[in-house]
Amino acid sequence: MNLLAIDQGTTSTRAMVFDGEGRVLGRAQTELTQRFPGPGLVEHDTEEIWRDTVKVMDGAVADAGIAMADVAAIGITNQRETTILWDRATGEPVHPAIVWQDRRTAPICERLVADGLSDLVRARTGLVVDPYFSGTKIAWLLEHVDGLRARAEAGEIAFGTVDSFLVWRLTGGRVHATDASNASRTLLFDIHRQDWDDDLLGAFGVPRAILPEVRDSAGDFGATDAGVPIAGVAGDQQAALVGQACLAPGATKSTFGTGCFVVVNTGDVAVPSASGLLTTVAVRLGGRTTYALEGSAFVAGAAIQWLRDGLGLFESAEDTERLARAADPAERVVMVPAFVGLGAPHWDAHARGAIFGLTRSTGPAEITRAALESVCFQTRDLLDAMAADGAAAPEVLRVDGGMVANDWLLQALADLIGIPVERPAVTETTALGAAALAGIGVGVLPGPEAIPRMWRPDRRADPEMAGAERAERCAAWADAVRRVKTS
């Protein structure tokens, strides 16, 4: 049994082939071009996403030494809130994809908040009014692309997050669908009734005609022209929760990719947050919805990418471990990577990044260490917010994403959050979760109970830092965050 996972992320597109035990048989990956047409603006070329997806699918299958006909099912996981509108007749995008990091819709959010929409949004969707989410991006496109609103109202335009767009293309336009986890990130979906919300559609000015059908995360999403079923779809963080086998209430994982995302499973209860977290759909299987509390920090690995590409401090992300170990421990540099504002629990769209504590002795090693530590501090902020909302402190935090290959970061994270950290043998748990959902969708896996056997540990880091030092370091971080906030 072979399962093919498409993991379309913010900075790269990956495909992986797994067997039924979660072992990696083949993989392929390519970097995705980042476009920054203005301050706070982030776009992707949607056709590049499609070309890369086809390329890595073929590459992963070839690397596994199999043919596409040997694939039992395809699972898709994706950067979630990134927004695409396309022509239903031609399949052509009407505008570059607006990435989840993009902040151009801040004025729309301010208008909606002034109109008193915050409480309705929170009650229905579990989210906050912020440029992060898809609904404001759709509203912006309908307002700014000539003639688009009329075409949308006439049913000529389709909206989708990346998963929905890929399903459309892979099925030759036969299926326009998404899953409940992706729908829950749009500001337009009632997570309690599990349906698009007419009140919110009216407030955002979004015609229902453009929206995809919302389906379970494992099930029928059509088939490719080659006849391979697409049977699993989930947003990247929800797929990682599945791939980390965090299936019981209280189980917690954190993914370190472009951003940092901490998610705790809350079972069949949609726990409201008073601490700036998001109440979201974790997964929907067999019509039954599992919920989660999520905290999202917008910049984690993106800070490392900036140090590499923007400042030229090193040639490869793998160099960061060596630099962090070489940093002078007496230097107390703190970086707040608010390049596109602050996410949870602060939600300040206008905050911008800063580096504090620079001296004449500060060099690339100290700045690199500060960037890595910023990921740890942001994770702690999110765990603290979860505790304030009533979530018990996890006995262990399961971590994944490209950054956790760094053993220094793994130990620093355990030290600064004060909780043991576990890294799995397969760190691409987002792809693993998508593959598992696809296996459930076509019945080659019996159900969620099969997932724990696909998870295997690789390394565990236990806290070693003294409590007094941890408190001092966290206080310095809190002071730095206070300095960059605008509200």
Image (tube, rainbow, N blue to C red):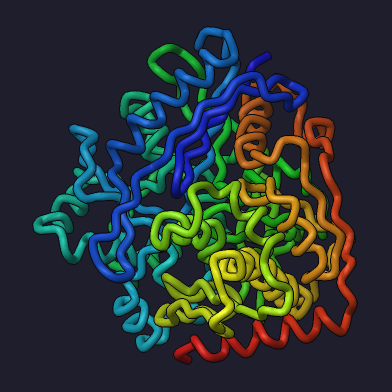
Describe residue 82's horizontal placement relative to residue 124 as left or right: left
Check the image and name the residue furthest to the left: 146
Q: Quadrant of residue 64?
A: top right
Nearest the viewer among 95 and 445 is 95
In the rendered view, would you say 385 is above or below 95? Answer: below
Q: Which of the 4 image quarters holds residue 204?
A: bottom left
Q: Is residue 404 among the parts visible in the rendering?
A: yes
Instruction: In the rendered view, tell whether residue 9 sits above or below residue 35.
Output: above
Q: Position of residue 44 (x, y in %)?
A: 32, 49
Q: Residue furthest front?
A: 361
* Residue 210 appears in the rendering: no
Nearer-the-camera pick, 56 or 242: 56
Left or right for 441, reference 341: right
Residue 377 x %, y %: 68, 73
Image coordinates of residue 142 in percent, x first then y, are: 21, 61
What is the x, y in percent for residue 7? 52, 37
